Image: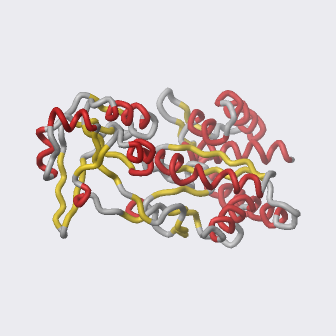
Amino acid sequence: MIGQLDDLATFVAVVDAGGFRDAARVSGSSASGLSEAIRRLDTRLGVRLLHRTTRSVTPTDAGRQLYERLRPALGEVGQALDAVNNFRDRPAGTLRLNVPANVARTVLAPIIVPFLKEYPEIRLEITAEDSFIDMVGGGYDAGIRYDERLEQDMIALPIGPRTQRILIVGAPAYFAEYGRPKHPSDLLQHRCLRGRFAGGRIAVWEFEKDGEIIRVDPDGPLISQPGSASDLLIQAAVGGLGLMGIFEDWMRAELNSGALEPVLEDWCPPFAGPFLYYAGRRYLPAPLRAFVDFLKQQP
């Protein structure tokens, strides 16, 4: 019975993810193992549950009916197990979080060590990506996002510093050669190091002062995905290759040492910090509840 329940949960996970590879990435299993579980279900039930092509995986009519009834039922099973888990002396299990790359580096880093030391039977799985995803459909217990990107009908809890700031910085050698911009529009005449989102779009630089918002799209010699290659961007800026716009906390050491100097600070106001968000329900998984309670105790 337990094996059959595992196969049913695999079926739901594959439909939620829209394919075996994404379901395997979320669950930590192999795509071939998930495919074998679906094959067992097909054989046991005597019907095909999924249409498979090289590009997509979608449920058949029978699979869709099974999924629609099975997903809420598995949710009830999960809540029942979570309720039993609350009777343990210490919460245990896996907590899956989906977070932006900058949050993983600057917000979670000082939190996860004391959290996991306090709850040694919890395993934390973190996926760092900047693309917007369906957190629940992706198989995550919770996500971390900024206010303008929070999903509706979710519970949001502040996490980390309540204000953050993106600064435009450059090396003293760069300013000695090219001068300092006095206005955001001056950046169009400068060499700028740019960031590209995971989806392919290059981030436009936005500035605000006294209610005026200015967006600029400058050119430059280097474009990189800032989350995964932030150190590359920082070192390029330190080397005098160009101006860079990045989270202030990411380059604290370089600012303190003078290797990088900020410009246009009055055009770079702070903004609200990120939030942990999760689906509101009566019974939270024990690892998530422990994490929420831990955050509420932080100063």
Task: State the image coordinates of residue 166 (x, y, percent, origin top left).
Answer: 34, 52
Front residue (pair 126, 299):
299
| Percent of width and height locating residue 15 | 58, 45
Q: Residue sitting at 39 percent across and 39 percent down?
A: 226
Between residue 132 and residue 170, name the one nearer to us: 170
* Closer to the camera in the image, 116 or 53: 116
* 275 in relation to 32, above or below: below
Q: How many marks?
A: 0
**Where does the C terminus fall, quadrant-wise?**
bottom right
- In this rendering, would 172 be left or right of 62? left
Residue ID at (52%, 46%): 105
Residue 295, picture quadrant: bottom right
Instruction: Name which residue lies at 80% across and 60% down.
Output: 91
Residue 1 sits above or below residue 289 on the image: above
**Corner quadrant of residue 150:** bottom left
Apparent side of residue 18 relative to residue 238 in the rendered image (left or right):
right
Q: Residue 200 falls in which quadrant of the image?
A: top left
Viewer-proximal residue, 245 or 253? 253
Give the residue drawn at x 16%, y 37%: 190
Q: Look at the image and name its color scheme.
A: secondary structure
